Amino acid sequence: MASTPTDSPRRAAYEILQRVADGAFADVVLDTVLQRSNLDLRDRRLVTELVYGVLRLMGRVDFALSQFCDRPLDRLQREVLWLLRLGAYQLLELDRVPAHAAVNSTVELTKELHLHDAVGFVNGVLRSFERGSADIPWPAAEKIKPYLQHVCSQPVWLTKEVMRQLPNVEARAFGEALATAPPMTLRVNTLKISRDDYLHELENSGHQAVPCSFAAEGVTITKRGEEPLPGNDEGWYQVQDEASILMSHLLDVNSGHNILDACAAPGGKTTHLATLGENRAPVLALDKYPQRVELITQSAKRLGCSTITAKTCDLTETVDFIEAQSFDRILLDAPCSGLGVLRRNPEGRWNKSPANLRELAATQAEILNTVAPMLKVGGKLLYSVCTFSHIETDAIIEQFLDDHQEFERLDLHQQLPAEWSDLFTSKGTLRSYPHRHNGMDAFFATLLQRR
């Protein structure tokens, strides 16, 4: 009897990859499939590894496959190419999967999918791959462009963007970091439990974890145990990268502030702002899509953040229910290309382009111009994005300051702990990178004040 996505991890991974190739988001499809499946914990982790690994390292896998395939990869039947990628990724990256199991399981999956004409071809290519993988002519690290493209799995446009931002040695280190799996980081919900107590709970549950380097509430899971993470139902934690955790700290909120989170979903920073406001500062959380607003509400309820009001609002249109100069603090975590979180959303490498960056930059500028008048005199506005491209970061702020003389940029370096100094640029903005800052995502942030 043929397997289905509910009882075969490789079949499930294949089906998810097909849907991502059609434009779906990997995390959404993966969660949906795993919720419906009968797979045990070990197989669920294999599915996750295969999906994210193949998408993250597709450039590397394709370069390796091209050495053993007698025709261009772009001329292969789409289903066959994804099967080869699935098998080759296991041969190339998963030491714990025996080579014969990687090959045989892919060949059997080819049969299950009724691709009978391709069975011999898939078997032949993967057998050749298995025998010759040690002799693949990988580009040398000194040849930075081909190294980033074929070893670090970056498309040409992304390679150019990285090299514009960083010198060669750092570009290579950054590319290598983007090619690895991201750490699992949690923000401990200090409304309910201290970080030290939660670390103790993790240890008792069989997990290994360490405190984050910068974020006082942050915990990095270094090794997962077999049990679920403690405190999910109790709202003890929020899954959130350390760089993302830092954003709310940059706003310097307190219980007396009226706060706006302008692009708030799914609510990680929103609930953190409420927590930093001691669950007494009102937080208005806006998002364009009703279903994402519901995520904010659910997150606030789970974490016990009672001062959050979530509303649907498109900030590229006129906002008539908010008066000018209404807020002491505004967080604008603007919609962006997500280049800084490609480890977590790896399909972004392959479905974005420079044109997308230009379109997003126009939207970011529009939203910033919309929310800026909502800030009180003396109030602070944090503009943040999980990307590193110039057009979405410094260029946005420089143009905004040219157009709005009533605003000035504050030097974050002078306002935050000395141990954070490595995070800040000469302009006083924050730029985090995984290769520099203990694996945290690549973020940009700048703090503006209304004169």
Image (spheres, rainbow, N blue to C red):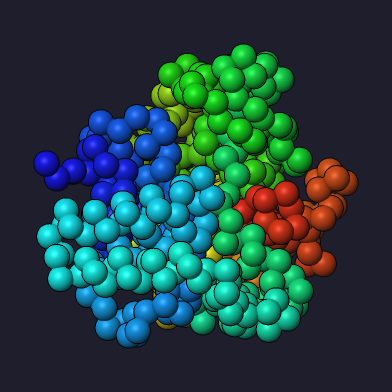
Tell me how many marks there are.
Answer: 0
Residue sitting at 61 percent across and 33 percent down?
A: 223
Instruction: Answer yes or no: is residue 259 visible.
Output: no
Q: Is residue 225 above or below residue 62?
A: above
* Quadrant assignment, res 258: top right
49 left or right of 71? right
Q: Is residue 72 above or below residue 44?
A: below
* Quadrant assignment, res 408: bottom right
Nearer to me, 7 or 211: 7
Nearer to me, 368 or 103: 103
Residue 419 x, y percent position in the rendering: 85, 45
Instruction: Answer yes or no: is residue 26 visible.
Output: yes
Residue sitting at 24 percent across and 54 percent down?
A: 109
The quadrant of the rendering that contains the N terminus is top left
Residue 446 x, y percent position in the rendering: 67, 59
Residue sitting at 43 percent across and 39 percent down?
A: 45
Nearer to me, 61 or 431: 61
Residue 433 x, y percent position in the rendering: 68, 59
387 left or right of 379? left
The quadrant of the rendering that contains the C terminus is bottom right
Q: Is residue 117 above or below residue 93?
A: below
Residue sitting at 15 percent across and 71 percent down?
A: 117
Residue 440 x, y percent position in the rendering: 65, 50
